[in-house]
Image (cartoon, rainbow, N blue to C red):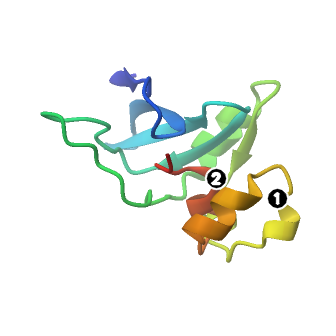
Amino acid sequence: MIEFRLADGRTPNFHQGVITYRGRHVTVVALRDSAVLAIAEPRVIETDGVIESGPLTFVEAPDLVTALSEQAGFEILTAAELTRPFDAAAWPELDEADIRYWTPETVGDALFNYWD
């Protein structure tokens, strides 16, 4: 583990654990309000008061997903699942008003975001 990046403000809606995996840095992102994880390129949450807020870039890391899957209670979504087009009917637990306002294009955009 290189570092934890905890989101303590309103945004983003996820925390990050930056690790070195197969010679590169990746981040395990974890939703703040559920046990859903994904693997993405590391993001800067705040630098000099500026928040990086664009969509995450999800990456494939099958061995890492397998290792994380062995931890009880977590759902790990792959890059392929997260880059699929978003269908609100498949995610009824997400806030309808946010979906209408932010109009996410992918599952990853809807789940891991910087919405206020």
Instruction: Give the residue drawn at x 49%, y 58%.
Output: 59
The amino acid sitting under disc 1 is Trp
Please state if 5 lies on the left or on the right of 33 as rendered. Answer: left
Q: Can the viewer see residue 59?
A: yes
Residue for point 35% across, 44% down: 42
Q: In terms of image quadrants, where is residue 69? A: top right
Dot placed on the residue nearer the N-terminal end, 1 or 2: 1
Q: Secondary structure at mark 1?
A: loop
| Front position in the image: 31 or 115 | 115
Q: Quadrant of the N terminus?
A: top left
Mark 1 vs 2: CB contact within 8 A: yes
Q: Can residue 80 be seen from the camera position used here? A: no
Residue at coordinates 82% horizontally, 58% vertically from top-left? 91
Residue 65: % across, % down = 65, 44
- Looking at the image, the residue that sits furthest to the left is 48
The Cα–Cα distance between marks 1 and 2, rounded to whole angstroms, is 9 Å
* Number of the label disc, if any, that sits on residue 108: none
Residue 33's x, y, as percent? Answer: 69, 31
Could you tell me residue 18's position as x and y percent? 39, 32
Task: Look at the numbered disc 2 and give the secondary structure of its residue.
Answer: helix
Which residue is denoted by mark 2 in the rendering? Answer: 111
Image coords of residue 79 (percent x, y): 59, 61
Q: Quadrant of residue 64?
A: top right
Above or below: residue 72 compared with residue 77: above
Q: Residues within 10 Å of mark 1 (few under 14, many from 20)?
A: few
User: Which label number is shown at residue 91?
Assistant: 1
Q: Amino acid at mark 2?
A: Leu
The residue drawn where x is 87% and y is 68% is: 89
Residue 25 or residue 111, whichever sits in front: 111
